[in-house]
Amino acid sequence: MGMTRVILSLLPVVGAAYVVPEAAKWKISSGTQTGVINNVGKRGAFFETNEMTLNPGEFSNGNRLNSMEMSLHDNKKLFKKANEFCNKGSFVKVEYDRFFGVDPRKGLSSRVVTNIEEIRTPTYKK
């Protein structure tokens, strides 16, 4: 009776350990967002990943829309482009896939960047 109780109590833990990483693989949508990249960097306490923050720069009913956290995974080419556009303050178009869950080994966001394009470079008036 005691062993059965132990097995039944461990079943949810083992199930969650399997389901959470599997759910993070389920792609639920793809999208495109424009804006300015505010922050690019490595994040994570245990698993270090490349992440960025995109500011849509739009207003809805007088309120600024929230920034979007996005993962670059370990794509060095995208990380370099994002860093370059962030430093220039460029307005960019970001294509991404959105996943059902978050896998902490691959970033802290359900949005994973697949492509970044510069739309325009900022012009400053004197």
Image (spheres, helix red, strand yellow):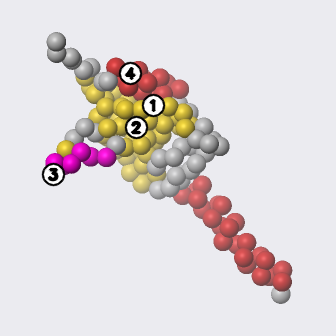
Q: Residue at x 58, y 41 (%)?
A: 44
- Helix, strand or loop status at disc 4: helix
Which numbered circle lies on residue 119? none
Residue nearest the observer in this picture, 44 or 70 = 44
Is residue 64 a member of the stretch shown in magenta?
yes
Amino acid type for the residue under numbered disc 1:
Val
Q: Which residues are magenta?
A: 60-66
Please give the residue where the numbered disc 2 appears in the rendered image. Answer: 53
Q: Earlier in the sequence, mark 1 or mark 2?
A: 1
In terms of image quadrants, where is residue 36? Answer: top left
In terms of image quadrants, where is residue 94? Answer: top left
The picture places residue 80, in percent across and down from the top left corner, at 47, 23
101 versus 40 height, above or below:
below
Q: CA distance from mark 4 to mark 3?
A: 30 Å
Amino acid type for the residue under numbered disc 3:
Asn
Q: CA distance from mark 4 to mark 2?
A: 13 Å
Give the farthest residue toward the bottom.
1
Q: CA distance from mark 1 to mark 2?
A: 7 Å
Please give the residue where the numbered disc 3 appears in the rendered image. Answer: 61
The picture places residue 68, in percent across and down from the top left corner, at 37, 43
Please give the residue where the numbered disc 1 appears in the rendered image. Answer: 40
The picture places residue 126, in percent across and down from the top left corner, at 16, 12
- Helix, strand or loop status at disc 3: loop
Q: Is residue 114 visible?
A: no
Q: Earlier in the sequence, mark 1 or mark 4?
A: 1
Q: Is residue 11 visible?
A: yes
Please give the residue where the numbered disc 4 appears in the rendered image. Answer: 87
Task: From the viewer's perspective, tell me whether residue 57 is left or right of residue 68.
Answer: left
Given contact means CB atoms under 8 Å apart, are the residues at marks 2 and 3 in contact? Answer: no
Task: From the viewer's perspective, tell me whether residue 65 is left or right of residue 50.
Answer: left
Q: Earlier in the sequence, mark 4 or mark 3?
A: 3
